Image: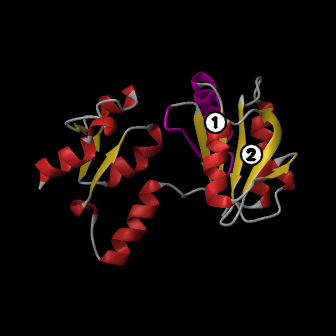
Amino acid sequence: MMTQEQLSSLQHEIDRMSVKPHGGILVFSPDELLVVRNYGSIPSGFLTMMASLYGEPRFVDSLMQVDVPVMKVTVFWTLAESETFVTQVRQNQADVHATTPGNGVVDIMAPGVNKAASLQRLLATLGGTPAELAVFGDGMNDLEMLAIAERPIIMPNADQRLFASGYAIAVADNNHDGVLRTWQELI
């Protein structure tokens, strides 16, 4: 979970940007969805989908008003702004982990919280090793996960930066059963 200090630091990083998020700020707790006011308009279809999981969202004026445990904060920028924001957070050494799938969305979590950490915990529970792990990714938010797996595979429509790493490429994209079809070839 993120601490109040991390939320405050994150609010400061958002406020440092020359432009504000155009598509809103969402705060995910284990039991509740919060929306930070005055940061753009979250698409109604997305809010409807989230409400089906969390119930109606509660609105706050800033991240400093969040009074529940926080698993993740999601901020919606343009693509270029999202990359600028992630770079800014890393350069300022903010005590958070910011990542983007490459579509303008930025997910911010506590340090050490990422897909690789979750997979390592799962492997430890199951008694497995990264040598037994095949993973599929398509965005920069998959980078840590791809790095620990014996068989890292990216989708043909992945973020272009992932292709430079020499990862295997799935036989089709995720809209054409790429994971299933590639998995069938692996086994």
Q: Is residue 184 left or right of residue 71?
A: left
Q: Of the residues under marks 2 and 1, which one precedes in the sequence?
A: 2
In the picture, residue 166 is in which quadrant?
top left
Residue position marked by numbered label 2 in the rendering: 10
Q: Residues within 10 Å of mark 2 (few under 14, many from 20)?
A: many
| Percent coordinates x, y for residue 60 in the rendering | 85, 50
Q: Can residue 36 be seen in the rendering of this structure?
A: yes
- In this picture, is 183 found above or below 31? above
- Label ID, residue 61: none
For disc 1, the marked residue is: 91
Tell me residue 169's x, y (percent): 23, 36
- Marks 2 and 1 sit apart, C-alpha to C-alpha, by 13 Å
Amino acid type at circle 2 is Leu
Q: Is residue 123 magenta?
A: no
Span of residues in magenta: 79-102
Q: Amino acid at mark 1?
A: Gln
Residue at 66% of width from left, 60% of height from top? Answer: 54
Q: Quadrant of residue 174?
A: top left
Mark 1: few/some/many CA within 10 Å (<14, 14-19, 20+) = few
Q: Nearer the viewer, residue 152 or 155?
A: 155
Q: What is the tally of numbered marks visible in this picture?
A: 2
Of marks 2 and 1, the one in the foreground:
2
Query: Which one is nearer the viewer's eye here, 65 or 2?
Result: 65
Q: In the depicted view, which residue is nearer to us: 1 or 104?
A: 104
State the image coordinates of residue 26 (x, y, percent, origin top left): 70, 47
- Is there any visible trace of residue 110 in the rendered image? no
Callout 2–callout 1 Cβ contact below 8 Å: no
